[in-house]
Image (cartoon, grey):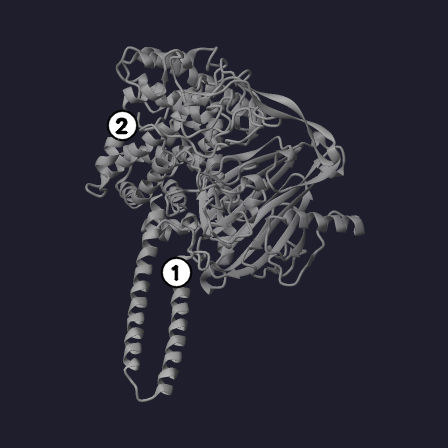
Amino acid sequence: MTGSGRRSSARSRIKSKTDANEDGRLRNAGDHRRNTSRDHTSLRLLNVNIKTLLGFTVFTFFIIWFLINRLVNPDQEPETPRVITPFPAPKLMDLPMFQGEHKESLYWGTYRPHVYLGIRARTPRSLVAGLMWLGVKDGRYHLRHVCQDSDELSKYGWTRHNGRDFGHQLLVDQDLTLETSFLKSKGDGSGYGGDWALRLDLQSEESRWNNDMQRTGYLFFYVADEDGNALSLGRDMFDIHESSLLAIGSRADIGGWQLHLKGMESLEVHYSGFRTPHIHNLSDLVLENLAAQATTFNRLQLSDTSVSSPNILVFQISARIPFKADIAFVSGTGVKTSRVEERLSSLTGTLLTSLLKEKQSEFDAKFENCFKMAAKLDSESVVVGKAAIGNMLGGIGYFYGQSKVSLPKNTKLKNHDNFLLYWPAELYTAVPSRPFFPRGFLWDEGFHQLLIWRWDVRICLDILGHWLDLMNTDGWIPREQILGAEALSKVPEEFVLQHPTNGNPPTLFLVLRELIYAIKKNKFTATESNEISSFLERALVRLEAWFQWFNTTQSGKEMSSYFWHGRDTTTIRELNPKTLSSGLDDYPRASHPSEEERHLDLRCWMLLAVDSLHSIAELFESSSEHKKEYGSTATLLSDFEILNQLHFDFAHGAYLDFGNHTEKVRLSWKEIKVGNNYPARELVREVLEKPELRLVPHVGYVSLFPFMEKIIPPDSWILDKQLDLISNRSILWTDYGLRSLAKTSSLYMKHNTEHDPPYWRGPIWMNMNYRILAALYYYSQVNGPYRERAEVIYDELRGNLIRNVVRNYHQTGFLWEQYDQKKGKGKGARLFTGWTALVLLIMGEVYGET
């Protein structure tokens, strides 16, 4: 890579300077010898001088050798490896637009998406808060805290959330219904970031009560200081009506703070204090405390004890169901003018009720203004649309930590581990799924932002800035961000390491392209346009480096061709080696990975990237020396004839990948010997025919990438062929959306290993359907012989997608990761409000540049 060349040159310059010093010293030593040899007055003095001189020379030689060796040999004094060196440019998050009022307005939030309800600040070591409760199933209590499918909640998620200061969530756990409402306030006297309040409303159907277990509700609210600062209990914990104060503390960022509880019914409160450097095991600490109390005293309550100087306080709130409780957090309490009682009053009781109603009305009005759905769809669809944007915004998280990056193959570092630690970094990001993927995913994030920028463009830019600031000096961004102990606790070990040779679709360009288009169409206020322009101007150097990283590390052997690195060339267990870096995982590629591969989707992603760079450069006259180069590269990658030469198959009438491929591959059972020579059977890949370089005959989402990028001219017969593939029930069409792989493919719905079921080999995915719909909408609007046909297909596909997602949501309570192509049933991860939330844009017919 070019970076390696720069590093070698630096070393050469250092060595040359050292060699010059060495030559000078040797010349001086030589002169000294010549001078002393002329002195015949004393042989003894001469002998002494010669010995001294020789000793000095040897000593000097070893010193110089040692210095040169330390400078040249990285094993002795290693430089920071490039892969964990930050990109050398001003950080986007240092822009003035992200400071001041904007930064403070986003300080507190529901930024812990992996728990059912969690609050923290956007700071590395925060004061955090969260909720647990006891659910009843089969006559036994179960503690709920971390989002997980094994809890078997009938429904949970944000019905509304504005991303800033309001959210309402509904959780249904067997016979319990819990509503949580979050509200943030910045008033006179409050500390940095302001105050916040929670309303907890617990209900149950009396007709289903079978015993006392179902008549009493148990909520556990906790507050913890990640900095380890000691927390103090309120004055009188056992009489909540005399004093609402639960806890007090102080932090450098917000000053003094207080936590209060106000109940509208008779509440019983117990507590326990813990001290631990991490909070990801807090559920276990609470369970242990409850179990000890139940065993010793036969009562279900916390111990009312605390360790010395606890940094975690847990409060058990119990009452007969139904009941409501308001929890208020007020900051800046150490100042005489803090007006604590007045602020506390506004965050609880009837005033809180009024504020929550006001925020709900504001949300509904903004929702209609952004997506204009009232005249297009029924009320059931509108409910799903609000849940889609609410869960997307409510699922935004803040993380801090260090990614683990696999050691480069050519590293000379003496490291006992198999990884390097990225620099400590923060990430503010939306997440695909709270129970399964509560962390940042690079290629998902571009799709998330297609929704978020339309709701709040400043939040969108904030998220994009955090992601781009994670770029290393080579222009690479780790594709999966697992930052901090809580995030690590949710990830299997084999998926933790990030590989610096592998990329991920640069989908952030999807939203950047839309922002540029919206600026040109004057869709923003003057202030917003100026902020977006400032952002793009600073981001350009990073975006250029990102593109160049792809252009150099993922380029193919043919001009303007690319292939995804990271496929396993030695596997004997995968039917078709996965392409995880593409984001399409098990979507079938060439059977035998090689450098001769040409991946169609990556070529189209590169066109998106370079076309966006060219548009950004045009916004800033003469700001980029590469503007002409981007223009010519975009012209090359959009060249219809070259595209057809590299990827079009006339027999299929489809665009395909190219590579070393045979269709005659299967998984066969083979007997192997395991421990103590016991026989066992496993599925092993068996190749029955020598592969050859050819187009790979698998039609699916990848085949439609040129269609999605609108490269195909509106009057081309090839466009008609694309419409054939889309509308043919024997290929991609279903009554619920377009399947990911054609029924005619030899790998359609085939397992990739014994335990690896089909993922992108048939099921319906919303992100690809959205992009295909956007292209259909485009071709239905431009003049051409296939315009009317595109419009008919568009209308039917849009209706099918909306109906199926709405039906599933009202039947199951969730948006799903994918949908079954046979019956339309939700599959994969549930509560997947990542790109599945794009159904909202489909409902509103919002397609970016069209």
Q: Residue at x 46, y 17 (%)?
A: 800
Please report whichever mark, 1 or 2, sits nearer to the chain's N-terminal start.
Answer: 1
In the image, residue 294 above or below residue 779: below
Mark 2 neighbour density, 10 Å: few (under 14) some (14–19) many (20 or more): some
In the image, residue 750 above or below residue 159: above
Q: Residue at x 51, y 16 (%)?
A: 746
Mark 1 neighbour density, 10 Å: few (under 14) some (14–19) many (20 or more): some
Residue that lies at the very extreme toward the left in this rendered image: 622
In the image, residue 733 above or below residue 182: above
Mark 2 belongs to which amino acid?
Leu
User: Could one spot residue 116 in this view of the protein?
Assistant: no
Give left or right: position of 145 versus 585: right
Residue that lies at the very extreme toward the bottom in this rendered image: 41
In the image, residue 119 above or below residue 843: below
Residue in front for this viewpoint, 390 or 560: 560
Q: Position of residue 821 (x, y in %)?
A: 52, 18
Number of the label disc, if any, that sits on residue 142: none
- Give the residue number, with chain letter if any, for mark 1: 71
Determine the secondary structure under disc 1: helix
Residue in front for this viewpoint, 833 or 342: 833
Which corner quadrant holds the N terminus? top left
Give left or right: position of 340 versus 524: right
Number of the label disc, if any, that sits on residue 636: 2
Q: How many marks?
A: 2
Q: Position of residue 794 (x, y in %)?
A: 38, 16
Determine the secondary structure under disc 2: helix
Q: Position of residue 775 (x, y in %)?
A: 35, 21
Measured in 3D between alpha carbons, the distance from the residue under mark 1 to the one under mark 2, in whole angstroms, is 45 Å
User: Could one spot residue 512 in this view of the protein?
Assistant: yes
- Say if mark 1 contacts mark 2, CB within 8 Å: no
Mark 1 belongs to which amino acid?
Leu
Q: Residue at x 54, y 42 (%)?
A: 496
